[in-house]
Image (spheres, rainbow, N blue to C red):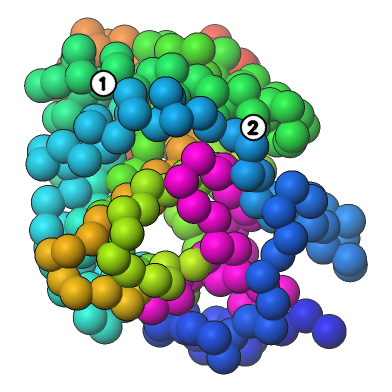
Amino acid sequence: PYLGEGALRKLAGTYIDVEAYDRFVEPNIIYVDAETGAPQILWLTTGLSLELQALALPVFQHNAIAAPGTAAYRPLAAGPAPGDAGSGIIGYFDRTRQHPYCRQTAFNLNHPKLFERALPYIQRVDMQFQRHFPAQWWHQMYAAMFTRGYIMRGTSFSTMTINKNFRTAVHKDQGDLLGSFGVMTVFKTPGFTGGHLIVPKYRVSIPYGNGDICFANVHQWHGNSEIHGEPGTFQRLSIVFYQRQRIVQCGTLNEELARVRGRSVGDPLYGWVRTGITGINPA
C-alpha cells in the first residue's frame, strides 16, 4: 500500500534518504498511480543531446543565478541545514507582495542574449513534454495561449528554477499551474554521489543524470537524497521547468505598471488586468 497523506505530512521539511525508498524506477517507463490511474513519473534517458547541453550549461551556471545561500529563502524545501545551496529563477514571474506586477526576472532583463543561448535546450525539453505527456502539455499550453508575453518562446513554460548543490527537504511544489506536471533536468560534474529525487508515497527514487529528463507529479511530496562530496569540488545543477499559476492573468508591461500606479491600500494583488479574458472579470 502507498504511504498515506498523514504519514507524508510528518515528513514535510525533513531530509529523507535510503530509508524512504525501496527501489529505483526503471528508465523510459511511465509509472502510474495504481489507485487513480494518473501518470506520476517518467525517467527519460533519450531526451537531450550533448550539443544542447553544451549550449545551456554556461547559462544555468551563471553566477547571477542562485547565489550561495539563496536556497534558505525556500524554508520548507530548504530543510534544517541549507548551507550554501542556491536557488533562483529565470524566465518570467507573476505578481508578488514584494513586486506587485508581472515582469521578466532580473537575469532575463540583464542577460537577454545569454538566455537566448539556452532556448534550444528549453524548447527540446518542451517537445519531449508534449510527446510523452500530451494531456498535461496541452493543459499548460492552453493557458500559455492566453498569456501575453510571459512565456519562453516556442514552449509552454514561463519560468525555470535553478538549484545549485541544493538537497531539498520533503515538500510539494507551489505556485505552478494546477493540473500541470513537473519537468526537470540536471547537470552533474564528477566528485559527488546522491541527490536522487525521492517520492516517498511510492517509495521510489529517480537517479536521473546528464541528458536525461525527469517528469514527475511534483504536487506529491518529494525530496532529494543526501549529496556526498567534498564542498567546492563538484557542482549539481537541477533545472525545473514550469508555468506560473497566475502568469495567465498578467497584462502587458504598460498595463501592469498602470495597475500598480492605480492601486490603493487593500486592493487585491491578483486578478485580471481587464475584463473579457476567457470570461473572467478582475478581482
Residue 213, located in which quarter of the rendered image?
top right
User: Which residue has dot 1 on it?
Assistant: 115
User: How many residues crowd around disc 2 within 10 Å: few (fewer than 14), some, or many (20 or more)?
Assistant: many
Does the segment drawn in magenta span residue 198? yes
| Rendering coords of residue 168 (x, y %) | 37, 69
Three-letter amino acid code at the position of disc 2: Phe
| Rendering coords of residue 215 (x, y %) | 62, 47
Residue closest to the eye, 48 or 20: 48
What's drawn in magenta, residue-wise? 197-226
Left or right of 130, for residue 268: left
| Rendering coords of residue 78 (x, y %) | 30, 70
Q: Which residue is drawn at 69% across and 77% down?
A: 23
Relative vertical location of residue 7 with respect to residue 247 in this rendering, above or below: below
Residue 124, located in which quarter of the rendered image?
top right
User: How many residues crowd around disc 1 within 10 Å: few (fewer than 14), some, or many (20 or more)?
Assistant: some
User: Which residue has dot 2 on it?
Assistant: 129
Q: Residue at x 45, y 30 (%)?
A: 50
Relative vertical location of residue 245 with respect to residue 122 in this rendering, above or below: below
Three-letter amino acid code at the position of disc 1: Phe
Relative vertical location of residue 250 with respect to residue 255 in this rendering, above or below: below
Residue closest to the eye, 184 or 92: 184
Left or right of 6, for residue 52: left
